[in-house]
Image (spheres, rainbow, N blue to C red):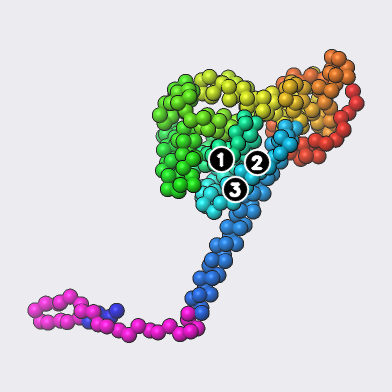
Amino acid sequence: MLFKLFITKESILWPVPVATKKKKRTLHDRIRVKTLHTLQRLRQSWAMEKLRNQTLEVAYSLLEETQFGNPLPSDNTPVRTCIENILTDPDTLDLLARMEKKSPHLRHHALSCLVLCTRFGQYLGITGQSLHNLALGALLHDVGILNTSSNTYDKTACIAAGDRRQSETHVLHGPRILANNPKFWAAIDVANAHHESVNGTGYPRKLKGEAIPYNARIVAIVEAYDTMVSSLTHNRDTDSPAQALSVLYRWMGIKFDQRLVESFIRFLGVYPVGSVVELDSGEVGIVIETKAFHLMMPKIALVLDNKGHKIAPEVIDLYQEKVDLKEGKHRIIKALQNNKYNIDISNIIKKNKYRRDRQP
């Protein structure tokens, strides 16, 4: 639309629009526009497919790790189906992409909690839609961090008071984000209440005991455990799995639900798979398998001799030793920091889980 100015000696009037002919698009122009739109849709589709495949790959890897030594029931279909249904949804993938952009650590923490919570939920007897809701809440419990300042997640545990207050607002932002999509409504309680404490000292509402939603009490335990053992979270030194369980144990009845903590310890074992432990012989090993009824006697891959020298992994079964020798030949005396000896724990577990035990 062109404008024509009418000017007089006395004043300048408002511009008056003058009609112009609209340029007619040629067939070539229409084909070009349609092609560009098609290419844009294809790029978006390819990007979504790539994101979906990458996300599922990470989830499957995490699921495989959690199965070592503490296998799923014979039918693990419900867990895999639940995870796949959640991680193939475009809206969920969009939120995960935003988490990745905010912090790769945030996305990894979300996926770790999803996998561990889904397995723990199945262990607790949760099934069907209830398991789906728990898993979704675990994945999106920290989604409110998307609306907090960008420097509050990737920090050490000792952050400034102002930053901590800003970070704590994520439990208020999360429900607002999730409320925009009915698919995510089942996760709202978890996003809001996973930092409540059973003694009423948590935030944001200081809920107490069973007033805290059940799923939020489960996710609180799992996400605290993952935060402690993950080297990706908050740029902090990691705790060993056994040390993390010890912290959960000390805080049960105060911050965490006592029965759920006890169930979580039974689920993982006193020395969870991946724990670095020292034996009374001075040797150091990696826990590669746990036993539900013999929590103090897992199967171990020895990786250091009693002088601290690296050795080819040797598998020993502490429970089988006790059966064969009555008293047993080895005993765990303490758990060590997972990163103390720069050992590729995941690789050792994968390579040695199915190896035959060393003869006592």
| Mark 1 to mark 3 CA distance (whole Å) | 11 Å
Residue 241, x across and y down, in percent? 66, 29
Left or right: residue 96 compared with residue 296: left
In the rendered image, the quadrant that contains the N terminus is bottom left
Q: Quadrant of residue 356?
A: top right
Tag 1 residue: 129
* Magenta region: 5-30
Q: Which amino acid does label 1 sit on?
A: Gln
In what element is the residue under mark 1?
helix
Q: Mark 3 points at which residue?
A: 85
Q: In which quarter of the image is the C terminus?
A: top right
Q: How far apart are marks 2 and 3 (CA)?
A: 10 Å
Please tell me how crowded label 2 is: few (under 14), some (14-19), or many (20+) other residues with Cα within 10 Å. some
Q: Magenta span: helix, strand or loop, mainly?
A: loop
Seen from the viewer's position, the closer of residues 357 and 10 is 357
Is residue 273 visible in the rendered image? The answer is yes
Image mark count: 3
For mark 2, give the secondary structure. helix
Q: Name the residue under label 2.
A: 78
Tag in front: 1 or 3: 1
Residue furthest toward the right? 359
- The outermost residue toward the front is 128
